[in-house]
Image (cartoon, rainbow, N blue to C red):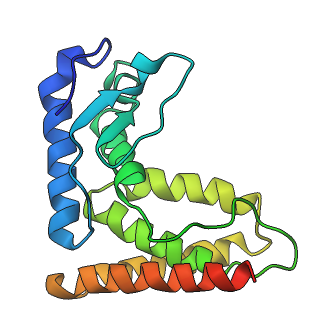
Amino acid sequence: MCRRQRGAQHRLDEVHDEVAQSITALRKAGVQVTVPRTVSDSLLTGRHKKRSTRSEWWLPLSQQAGANGPGMVGVRYGVLLTAVRFPCSFPQSFEAGQPVDWVVNHDAATLWAALVIDVDGPYLAWRRGEYNGTFQNADEVLAKVEQRARDARRLPAHRQGAWFNAEQQKACRNAQETTR
């Protein structure tokens, strides 16, 4: 699944296992993840970054698993950001006066997936930074996102995937209302 690269080469088996286990955990929980044909280190693309597709993922493996990176939590975080896809697109920016209700549903669904593979810490840190620059009530929004995701994680395992899919659909409906 992973090609050999500089930086993460000494941990290639561990990186491979982490990617595979993360995909398996997400799929088992109900996330529709297409198993990629290849997972490659984005370091190989140089300055000309390639975008991941469903069949070919470009993750910062050397940066994450290398000596100065966060380790396997960083690899799992890369899997989260690449694997969790929504069946719609979202506004690229927030404009004053536009509803942003979709953010709560989007982020709660993504946080739930982050909890599944134990990368909620990095995800929440990133969103906290984004919220603080966007929302006047950033703490309230983040608390609502966290509560929704943690409540969903307490559901019986067989109901969590359905919750995730419903939350994705709510996010998409709310985003469509924003663009009207």
Quarter of the image where one finds residue 138: bottom right
Q: Is residue 67 left or right of residue 108?
A: left
Please provide percent x and percent y for residue 149: 40, 77
Q: Which residue does the image show at 39% across and 49% down from the upper left? A: 82
Check the image and name the residue furthest to the top: 6
Q: Which residue does the image show at 37% across and 39% down from the upper left? A: 74
Please provide percent x and percent y for residue 38: 23, 35
Please provide percent x and percent y for residue 168: 44, 78
Q: Is residue 58 left or right of residue 139?
A: left
Please provide percent x and percent y for residue 90: 61, 67
Q: Which residue does the image show at 22% across and 88% down from the upper left? A: 159
Quarter of the image where one finds residue 8: top left
Q: Which residue does the image show at 21% across and 53% down from the upper left? A: 23
Q: In which quarter of the image is the N terminus?
A: top left
When the figure is inspected, residue 40 is found, relative to residue 161, above or below; the finding is: above
Q: In which quarter of the image is the C terminus?
A: bottom right
When the figure is inspected, residue 59 is found, relative to residue 44, above or below; the finding is: below
